[in-house]
Image (tube, helix red, strand yellow):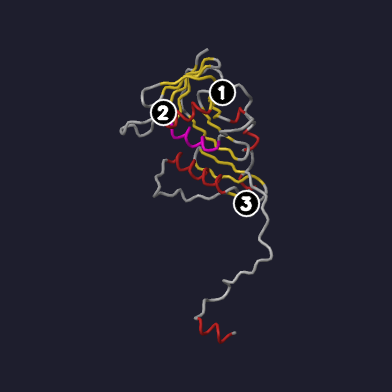
Amino acid sequence: MKTSITVFQKDLKAVAHAMATKDVRYYLCGVLIQSNAAETRLVATDGHRLHAVQHIGQDNKIIQEPVSVILPLEMVKTCIKAKVARHNHCPEITFYIDGSQIEAALPDGTSIKSFAVDGKFPDYCRILSFPMETFTNEAAAFNPSYLVDADQGLRDYLELNKSQSHGLSMAQRGTSVGILASGGFVAAVMPTRAEMCKGFAVGLGKPLQAPEAIKQAA
């Protein structure tokens, strides 16, 4: 049975930062889209970080049973690059799904077709199931490029320009996953193993002195 799911272009762009692009786990090279009419979710992960957007009340009434497909990488790239008219402040993309066949109606009036990725997406619910009080803000080391992508994903979701700030920071849990979240967007980043600097003297522990004072002290 053919069904349709409508999402905001900005939401797809927000999660696409975390999808894998070259991975033997081909099912990670794309974006998972799920909907049960009352709620729609977009999820992407490369195994090291995860971005997800939850939208309540998208009102995809055509759906009778929950739908879950993985949008292929190239389709996602085309969707997020589609041009938008100036007057369209919140462009949408509608995916028409018929079995493994997917057609995307883009905000520029064109459409593209592809096949869903044939694979099983990871259990993202297990990764995102935790009470907020477990965040202890213990120091953690993160891949800086993942942090940049998480920040940009949230900025895309909130539609912030370069001069605006969301004012949020990564909630840390030491050696466990770090979270950056706001509204229906969440970015989860796994920490990396890092050694603290040891055995290096730091020469900035005293006020800077004039050269003569340094000579006299010597």
Give the residue type at disc 2. Answer: Glu
Q: Secondary structure at mark 3?
A: loop
Majority SS type along the magenta span: helix
In the rendered structure, are the residues bearing label 3 and label 1 in contact, judged by CB atoms less than 8 Å apart?
no
Identify the residue at image location x=55%, y=82%. Answer: 214
Quick one: SS at disc 1?
strand
**102 or 177: nearer the eye?**
102
The residue at which mark 3 appears reads as 141
Tell me which amino acid carries mark 1. Val
Label 1: which residue?
Answer: 69
Residue drawn at (45%, 40%) of the image? 156
Disc 3 versus disc 1: nearer the observer: 3
Q: Which residue is tagged 2?
A: 92
> Which kind of residue does numbered mark 3 sit on?
Ala
- Of mark 3 and mark 1, the one earlier in the sequence is 1
Occupied quadrant, residue 22: top right
The residue sitting at 64% across, 30% down in the picture is: 24
> Considering only vertical position in the picture, is 115 above or below 207?
above
- Place of residue 178 in the rendered image (x, y in percent of width and height, measured from the top left): 60, 46
